[in-house]
Image (tube, rainbow, N blue to C red):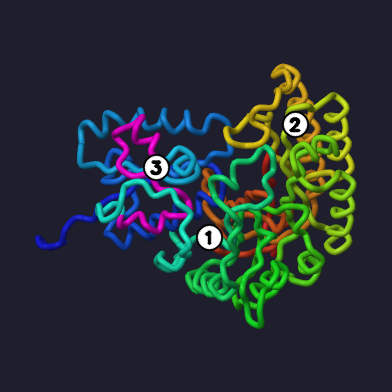
Amino acid sequence: MTASTPAAKKLFIKTYGCQMNVYDSQRMAEAMGAEGYVLTEDQADADMVLLNTCHIREKAAEKLYSDLGRLKPLKAARPDLKIGVAGCVAQAEGAEIIRRMPLVDLVVGPQTYHRLPAMARGEIPAIQTDFPEEDKFDHLPAARATRRAPAAFLTVQEGCDKFCAFCVVPYTRGAEVSRPAERILSEARDLVARGVREITLLGQNVNGWHGTGTGGEWGFGRLIRALGEVAGLDRIRYTTSHPNDMGDDLIAAHRDVPQLMPYLHLPVQSGSDRILKAMNRKHTAQQYLRLIDRIREARPDILLTSDFIVGFPGETDQDHRDTLDLIEKVGFAMAYSFRYSPRPGTPAFDRPEVDPAVADARLQELQALLTRKQKAVQQDMVGRTVGVLFEKAGRETGQMIGKSDYLHSVFVQTDAVQVGDLRAVRIVESAANSLRGELVA
């Protein structure tokens, strides 16, 4: 470095929550990279600290304020340190964050983080939480793959119009917005050119995507087909979906597009029609089960995962049994499950809650069933040969870790593969949350 070359500024980002936030953090890092910032893993060494928050989990705001409290000594020692809060809690709390924590310099919502560089320069107000008409992606640098990663996220859709009674997303992410097809395809081609072999399409309601494409408006199934024609893109995934947007063309894409992996995360939340109605899910348990039958008819080997909320207001023992019955019928490979926790501003916020002890007992019973199903699915993988995209070295010498076609973590003891290799692997053992395999010669 010459005497005239200024030292690079350093950016530390802590990411909470979902895959969308991981993608957003990457894009914020790219935006600030254009301002001369480089990422650091040591917040004590940073010139800017960004906390990219999520509002889905319980006590999200309290966790943020706790983390900000731990930054007070760092800010006191280095008053020039910039501290920013981004994401959904920033959107929900706004100016309250700076009122409670004056050490915070910037508050930016998920739809306005393209303004972060101008905020850091002091050119625009330090609080940006509106829902702008302009597309933030038009103002961001071109997305890039980092660390030669073979897998990447690509946001295609944001926001949600479903207004489930328990969910804050429509209020923190706004109405559904779909990116134009060509911009998605261009970003995908660029990622592939940088070494990416697998892309996971992201959206709060990703299969509700309907964007402008050649010849007019496309549906999500057509977008999948177009991505399947991108040379060098070996794998396509998407998350998270709503059952009501699993259209015929998308189901057919699972049959017709070999790059679309045999894995689908399709949240149902409950197996009780009464609770589904109270949640404003706009589908019944039987409609969900019929949909699963159609998906499996198109792709018989597909693995299904889901989300469940236990103890939603008004849930009875029978409602809980209905949920357990649905799990038995579907046989999920895995599922995320949580005890209901109220979110301010949502329709269910003021409804009487189920006794916490009862809800906890139901959650334990449900999770025990899900664990049994997961173990059975993983055990069924033993003896099968699957494709594995290797993503990193393991902790043990000579160990490599990758993701199977079915999104299982697979450990292989080998010195014959590198990060980014896609190889055939025979599964030889099932562990608690992963599989062990051997390369097929």
Q: Is residue 230 above or below residue 137?
A: below
For label 2, the residue is 367
* Quadrant showing the C terminus: bottom right
Q: Is residue 229 above or below residue 8?
A: below
- Please report the residue visible at 53 percent of the width from the left and 60 percent of the height from the top: 419
* Quadrant showing the N terminus: bottom left
Three-letter code for the amino acid on which mark 2 is drawn: Gln
Foreground tag (3 vs 2): 3
Q: Which residues are magenta?
A: 95-118
Rendering coords of residue 424 (x, y %): 69, 62
For label 1, the residue is 419
Three-letter code for the amino acid on which mark 3 is drawn: Val
- Tell whether position 355 is magenta: no
- Describe the element under mark 1 as helix, strand or loop: loop
Q: How far apart in space, not on screen, are marks 1 and 3 (Cα)?
A: 33 Å
Q: Which mark is residue 85?
A: 3
Q: How far apart in space, not on screen, are marks 3 and 2 (Cα)?
A: 34 Å
- Tell whether position 108 is magenta: yes
